[in-house]
Amino acid sequence: MKIKRFFTILALLLVLSCVSISEVSAHRLIIDHEIGEIEIKAYFGDGTACQDANVKVYDKEGNLYMTGVTDDKGKFSFPPEIGMEEYTVAVDAVHMPGHKAETLINLSQAAAGAGSAGGTEMPLYTRVTAGLGYLIGLAGAAMVYMSWKLKKKI
């Protein structure tokens, strides 16, 4: 019995020492970051991707910044230039003549709205009202259940 207890205590000490060694030896600090690319997605009205479309990116002054082609998912990405906050992106679907689109991308406005979920967050008063309605609905359902139980007893 003493040998079993000895090996149990020894096993516990080994496990605890391994845990403390891994915590103590964690002195390395790694910081990793990425500077995001601007990604656009081109698609038609029915939701299909606009593949192999010519993309032209212009800066704020109208100078050509970059050209490219969308991939098989209709996506194209490009790195933003430091200090440039506004881009005009023009997409021309070469396989579907006449299908062209242009949009303005403003990074300062996009950064300001990054905390919200795409600008679709409900205002506070709407959330409070919805929460109260939810609680009143639950209370009503509980009252109906309780009255049903009382009727069943009688």
Image (cartoon, grey):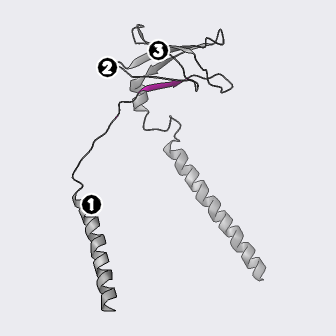
For residue 152, which quarter of the picture? Answer: bottom right
Q: Nearer the viewer, residue 6 or 88?
A: 6
> Taking 6 as reference, is 23 above or below it?
above
For residue 134, which quarter of the picture? Answer: bottom right
**Residue at left 57%, top 55%?**
132
**Residue at left 60%, top 54%?**
133
Judge the density around disc 3: few (<14), some (14-19), many (≥20) Cα neighbours within 10 Å: some
Q: Earlier in the sequence, mark 3 or mark 1?
A: 1
Residue found at the far front of this picture: 3
User: Which structural element holds mark 3?
Assistant: strand
Whether the residues at callouts 2 and 3 have beta carbons within 8 Å, the answer is no
134 inside magenta stretch: no
Judge the density around disc 2: few (<14), some (14-19), many (≥20) Cα neighbours within 10 Å: few
Q: Quadrant of the C terminus?
A: bottom right
Three-letter amino acid code at the position of disc 3 = Thr
Three-letter amino acid code at the position of disc 1 = Ser
Per the rendering, the mark at residue 72 is none
Q: Quadrant of the N terminus?
A: bottom left
In this view, the mark in front (2 or 1):
1
C-alpha distance separating marks 2 and 3: 15 Å
* Range shown magenta: 34-42
**x and y percentages locating residue 17 in the rendered image:** 25, 69
Three-letter amino acid code at the position of disc 2 = Gly
Residue receiving disc 2? 83
Residue receiving disc 3? 88
Q: Earlier in the sequence, mark 2 or mark 1?
A: 1
Residue receiving disc 1? 22
> Taking 144 as reference, is 119 above or below it?
above
C-alpha distance separating marks 3 and 1: 51 Å
40 inside magenta stretch: yes
Q: Earlier in the sequence, mark 2 or mark 3?
A: 2
